Image (tube, helix red, strand yellow):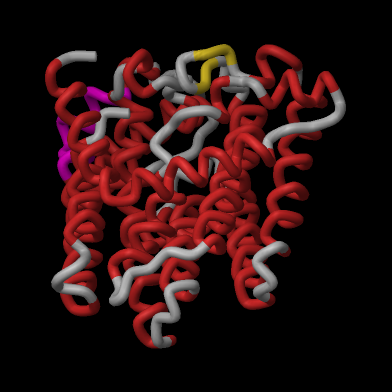
Amino acid sequence: MNNIGTELARSYRTILEIIQPELEQVEELLRQELSSDNDFVQKMLQHPMFWGGKRIRPALVLLSGRALQPGNLTPNHHVVAAVLEMIHAATLVHDDILDEAMVRRNCESLNQQWGSQLSVLLGDFLFSHAFTLASTTGSTFACQQIGLATNAVCAGEINQITSQGNFELTESDYLHIIDGKTGRLCSVACLLGAHFSDAPAETATILESIGLYYGRAFQIIDDVLDIRGNEAKVGKSLGSDYRQGKLTLPLISALQTSGAALRDEIVARMRKGEFKPEEVSSFIDQHGGFDYAFSRATEYVHQAQALLQEVSPNCAQPMMDLGDFILTRQS
């Protein structure tokens, strides 16, 4: 990790210091729950992809709960944080199968190691286990919201797959996809963090919007990194979206600004598979696609931060700082 990467990692740890004891409780809960009496399932659950990562969704649950007065966190905060991390992990397992990814968190992906059949079943195991754990909150509202969010994630993935090869995809279409894929789990994390801190319904709804904006920004930056990130730093296989004909915001923007003649030429080459992956980053850069994507991510972070100032001007600084981290991360 270079100096910039070290500084980013340090800044993220600093942001999470206020909730570190609670995050440790979430990790302990995950250690208890990510287990099985079946020896082979237990072996698969020891894969590094389940242990580590940024834990953005648990952080959003806990930071949302702490951002509101009196800011007391409850065992249900820990449960919901673990549930959303398990659902996120399940989606990663299935994503890697769909993308035929070979690397996840700098290790051989589950599907690469054990094949697609076993990986699909492990993802299903994680989903069902997460819903069982959610039921221990005793909250019908929480279980319903988690179920709706998971449905939205699956629908987002379906929308993206059915949009493969659609070079007419618009920014609005793209946002609809990522709101399902990423935004919805982030928004429900904030909603339930507020809910279990007994926030008024109006405040919880504002926190839900904050989570959506952060989720959008996170996914946009993720899509930038997928094209021009460093695989060793990002820790997963890159370039899968372009290889599968899935347009993301940097390329959508570049195609829109490149002029009709060049755009038609590039699209024709992409349809024939003649536009080489190494040319993609250069084309996007030349036509401002990366700059535009970053500007849009920045707008969403600033919208979220403005709402935070509105609902919790005195207690929300760590959550404000999380938005800045989303924009500067390299992995």
> Is residue 289 one of those drawn in magenta?
yes
Of residues 37 and 287, the one drawn nearer to the viewer in this rendering: 37
Residue drawn at 29 percent across, 76 percent down: 69
Residue found at the very far right of the displayed protein:
38
Quadrant of the rendered image containing residue 286: top left
Quadrant of the rendered image containing residue 134: bottom right
Location of residue 144 in the rendering, given as x and y in whole percent from the top left corner = 66, 72
Location of residue 23 in the rendering, given as x and y in whole percent from the top left corner = 43, 45
**Is residue 259 visible to us here?**
no
Count numbered badges in the picture.
Answer: 0
The image shows residue 187, relative to residue 85, as above or below, that is below
Location of residue 43 in the rendering, given as x and y in whole percent from the top left corner = 74, 18
Q: In this view, does 16 lie to the left or right of 134?
A: left
Residue drawn at 24 percent across, 14 percent down: 1
User: Chief secondary structure of the magenta span?
Assistant: helix
Q: Is residue 40 left or right of residue 84?
A: right
Of residues 179 and 6, the one drawn nearer to the viewer in this rendering: 6
Which range of residues does the magenta coloring cover?
280-291
Residue drawn at 52 percent across, 53 percent down: 81
The image shows residue 87, relative to residue 68, as above or below, that is above
> Is residue 256 one of those drawn in magenta?
no
